[in-house]
């Protein structure tokens, strides 16, 4: 197992390298001079030259590339063009909020989605199946911000159960968790739809297998057949897909943070985009790339743990 | 070229194709939810085409005295922050949603198919490079890719279409790649090659027609996500610039008045949800036609 993990980590290096290169190149095709974009069209020549020097834009492109890569390796993601503070500092303050939100959403999705999928598969073509399928397709269709607005309207503006907007930090953990409920469900419900559909189709396949029929024929209790014989092999493809969904979740978290005005990586990214803060944007992209690579590695590890066949 | 006619389809193939289509339609039409979706999609397209006839008011005419009003006789869903009729704006928003959705899927579909087919057909270093790139693009969430491209390109309808097309390209490339790999080894392609046909002819006559159906089906599924992505980017403020009526922008503007005038944001949101839902229903039905196993 350890050998597999090490091999998997080494495999991630070229991918990460390629991603970093793409991000670098993308940031260099920004039309016009980023220095002018920051300072405005009426900036003086000296101001622009000074900023270009500070940003390293006066160096040849390969030198900028080497600087950028060595910076990333050392954990230096550059300074924000707007605040002039290290980008990593801004990212570090909001990152825990995003991780908390995403983690809570994954938990909600698994706790609701896997039982939902199993129930609809077992009760295939009954009204329960039909209802859950329509609901999950609606959940897939609704963008995160629309679910968020609905929840905000019903449970916050009308019922007054939860705060619509809150910036309570981790030092006020009670308030913080209270404010987490709506955003977490917003993000989690869309994910629940994926997990439900996935679990359902996987379970339908597994339930038609010969060994499940054999288990039934042996006279085993329905519960035992489901839990022991069907769900365990069914978990393999589900785990593999949870990785993909977690990545989708990162996209949804951007919208959720925007709706609830919640601090986080997504909100920071939108701010950086609208303020044309290209170095901050580049730094956030690097962090996203790292998160995506790490999630993929974790999924691969869980995958081999659930299905020992993959190891060989 | 004489070689062209020697490998044209046998007479029986035409009949086989027709009955295959008929069977596909039977599978699709037996699926009640897919039919409901199809009817909804047709209605939505009609709304987009007939928006100027159906809309009771001009979507851009402002009236600052009458701003922020709830539903009334002449204004079914009320008036927004500029006094514009919300219902008319929703109807016109259908046009942007469909235009961006369909055009970006077409553009992304063309680019993706070209990449996938080229990688599989020519193989070698090109294959390794292109498919690696595709995998990397696929690992990023659509919204992040779209946001990044919009940040680089700036706002505007064409740029929005390009940004969304770029998120769709790798998906088409992946789907076009697999079957092409298989087709390349088939006897009829080998025969065509042995006859000395050009790559262009082999690709357009023997490869593309064989993977076309699947790509069209997937295009309908991705139209749903393209429309959703368009609304998401507009919601962030990176879509088609105002005052053009787009659902995402309307939702964004209405959010401020959520507790006093919830319809300002919830109504365009419902239009968006219904549209994406309809395309997903059709896409699901088409997928069942393609892959009968998924019906369970």
Image: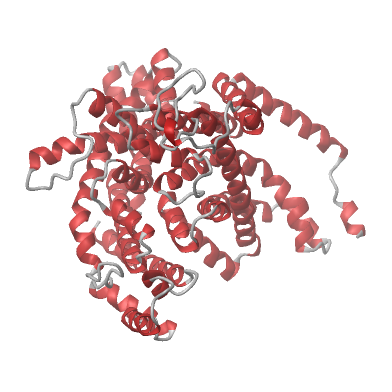
Q: Considering the image in quadrants, where does the C terminus of chain A appear?
A: bottom left
- Quarter of image, res A40: bottom left
Q: Residue furthest right?
A: B2
Residue B169 at x, y percent in the picture: 55, 53
Q: Residue furthest top?
A: A127
- Quarter of image, res A183: top left
- Quarter of image, res A231: top left
- A252 in relation to A135, above or below: below
Residue B237 at x, y percent in the picture: 42, 49
- A193 in relation to B36, above or below: below
- A277 in relation to A235, above or below: below
Q: In this orientation, which residue lies closer to the viewer: A133 or A229?
A: A133
Q: In this orientation, which residue lies closer to the viewer: B127 or A262?
A: A262
- A271 in relation to A175, above or below: below
Q: Residue furthest front?
A: B65
**Residue drawn at 60 percent across, 34 percent down:** B290
Residue B274 at x, y percent in the picture: 49, 28
Give the left or right position of residue A172, taking residue A24 as reference. Answer: left
Q: In this orientation, which residue lies closer to the viewer: B94 or B190?
A: B94
Residue A169 at x, y percent in the picture: 12, 47
Q: In this orientation, which residue lies closer to the viewer: B268 or A73?
A: B268
Q: Considering the image in quadrants, where does the N terminus of chain A appear?
A: bottom left
Q: Is residue A209 visible?
A: no
Q: Is residue B96 visible?
A: yes
**Residue drawn at 64 percent across, 27 percent down:** B42
Give the left or right position of residue A59, taking residue A5 as reference. Answer: right
**Residue drawn at 37 percent across, 70 percent down:** A38
């Amino acid at each position: 197992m350890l050998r597999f993990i090490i091999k998997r980590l080494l495999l991630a290096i070229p991918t990460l390298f390629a991603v970093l290169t793409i991000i670098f190149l993308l940031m260099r095709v920004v039309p016009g001079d980023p220095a002018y974009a920051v300072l405005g069209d009426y900036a003086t020549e000296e101001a622009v030259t000074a900023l270009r020097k500070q940003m390293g834009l006066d160096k040849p492109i390969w030198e900028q590339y080497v600087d950028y890569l060595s910076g990333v390796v050392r954990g230096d993601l550059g300074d924000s063009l707007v605040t002039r503070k290290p980008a990593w500092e801004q990212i570090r303050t909001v990152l825990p909020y995003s991780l908390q939100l995403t983690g809570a959403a994954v938990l909600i999705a698994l706790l609701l989605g896997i039982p939902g999928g199993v129930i609809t598969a077992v009760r295939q073509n009954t009204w329960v199946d039909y209802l859950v399928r329509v609901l999950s397709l609606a959940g897939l269709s609704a963008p995160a911000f629309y679910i968020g607005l609905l929840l905000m309207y019903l449970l916050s503006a009308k019922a007054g159960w939860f705060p619509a907007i809150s910036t309570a930090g981790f030092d006020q953990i009670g308030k913080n968790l209270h404010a987490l409920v709506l955003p977490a469900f917003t993000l989690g419900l869309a994910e629940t739809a994926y997990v439900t559909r996935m679990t359902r189709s996987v379970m339908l396949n597994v339930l038609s297998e010969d060994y499940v029929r054999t288990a039934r024929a042996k006279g085993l209790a329905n519960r035992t057949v489901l839990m022991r014989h069907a769900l365990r092999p069914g978990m393999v493809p589900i785990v593999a897909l949870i990785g993909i969904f977690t990545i989708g979740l990162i996209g949804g978290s951007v919208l959720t943070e925007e709706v609830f005005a919640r601090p986080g990586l997504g909100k920071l990214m939108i701010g950086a985009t609208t303020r044309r803060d290209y170095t901050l944007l580049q730094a956030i992209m690097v962090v996203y790339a790292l998160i995506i690579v790490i999630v993929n590695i974790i999924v691969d590890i869980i995958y081999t743990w659930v299905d020992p066949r993959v190891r060989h | 070229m004489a070689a062209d006619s020697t490998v044209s389809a046998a007479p029986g193939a035409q009949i086989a194709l027709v009955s295959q289509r008929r069977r596909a339609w039977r599978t699709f039409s037996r699926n009640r939810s897919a039919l409901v979706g199809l009817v909804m999609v047709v209605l939505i397209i009609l709304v987009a085409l007939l928006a100027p006839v159906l809309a009771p008011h001009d979507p851009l005419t402002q009236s600052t005295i009458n701003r922020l009003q709830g539903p009334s006789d002449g204004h079914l869903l009320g008036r927004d922050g500029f006094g514009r009729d919300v219902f008319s704006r929703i109807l016109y928003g259908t046009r942007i949603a469909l235009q961006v959705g369909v055009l970006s899927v077409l553009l992304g579909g063309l680019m993706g198919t070209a990449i996938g087919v080229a990688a599989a057909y020519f193989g070698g270093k090109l294959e390794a490079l292109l498919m690696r790139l595709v995998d990397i693009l696929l690992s990023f969430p659509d919204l992040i890719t779209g946001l990044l491209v919009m940040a680089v390109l700036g706002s505007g309808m064409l740029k929005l279409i390009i940004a969304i097309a770029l998120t769709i390209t790798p998906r088409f490339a992946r789907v076009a790649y697999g079957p092409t790999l298989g087709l390349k080894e088939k006897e009829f392609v080998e025969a065509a090659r042995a006859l000395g046909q050009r790559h262009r002819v082999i690709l357009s006559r023997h490869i593309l027609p064989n993977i076309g159906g699947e790509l069209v089906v997937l295009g309908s599924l991705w139209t749903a996500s393209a429309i959703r992505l368009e609304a998401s980017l507009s919601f962030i403020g990176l879509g088609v610039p105002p005052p053009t009526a787009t659902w995402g922008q309307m939702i964004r503007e209405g959010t401020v008045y959520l507790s006093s005038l919830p319809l300002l944001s919830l109504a365009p949101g419902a239009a968006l949800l219904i549209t994406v839902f309809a395309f997903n229903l059709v896409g699901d039905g088409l997928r069942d036609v393609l892959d009968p196993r998924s019906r369970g």
